[in-house]
Image (cartoon, coloured by chain):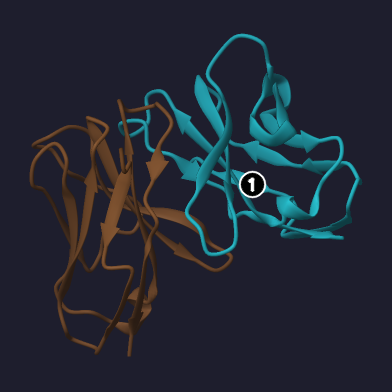
Amino acid sequence: NAGVTQTPKFQVLKTGQSMTLQCAQDMNHNSMYWYRQDPGMGLRLIYYSASEGTTDKGEVPNGYNVSRLNKREFSLRLESAAPSQTSVYFCASSAQAYNEQFFGPGTRLTVL
Amino acid sequence: AQSVSQHNHHVILSEAASLELGCNYSYGGTVNLFWYVQYPGQHLQLLLKYFSGDPLVKGIKGFEAEFIKSKFSFNLRKPSVQWSDTAEYFCAVNQYGGSQGNLIFGKGTKLSVKP
């Protein structure tokens, strides 16, 4: 039982490049989330998916898109990376909304 | 907008000292409350949670927190810290009626424990 897994662990992009961050959970959770963590800012929600087939914007959605591919997988795409998107990205899942969330190991992204 | 405030940015303690980290939130309705811990280079792990019932909740590794509804607070405590408690601690709240149960995080408190 791996919990929440994320790939890649590290990534360096040049401004304007695109990439997709992958997230999968094996806990049969309904809800999945993407956060970014910046020093002194805590975690801020980018997008979430309350259940399979639905996605909604969080606090900081600009410059990102998401896909809930199936119940297990929730990907985050940067279409045209900017230096302001340099951050650590965490995926999380929860059984239902309002339950505790379980976090993946994170992806450290640097945009040059 | 709802918010979560953690009063201390960085706390430095010696081993065996007592710890209390403050957390206040701004939402007046029904809330679920959480404390997460992030050890250096690792992901967030749940320390404890409060949904309902006894406002004094016990978590892992000797941590506890008290929910005081009248003060909108959920402070984290530990009677005697260890060097291994060095980490960043995040308070989080989700409110019923909010957007699908999203967690609102505080900005975190870094705890450094000197051996």
Left or right position of B111 against A28:
right
Left or right position of A64 against B46:
left
Name the outermost residue toward the top: B53
**In the rendered image of this protein, does residue B4 appear above or below residue A76?**
above
Closest to the observer, B110 or B14: B14
- Viewport quadrant of the C terminus of chain A: bottom left
Quarter of the rendering containing residue B56: top right
Left or right position of A9 against B82:
left
State the residue position of label 1: B5
Name the outermost residue toward the front: A1
In percent of the image, x 50 and y 40: which residue is there? B2
**In the rendered image of this protein, does residue A88 appear above or below residue B13?**
below
Q: Colour of chain A?
A: brown
**In the rendered image of this protein, does residue A8 appear above or below residue A55?**
below
**Chain colored cyan:** B
* Picture mark count: 1
In percent of the image, x 8 and y 46: which residue is there? A69
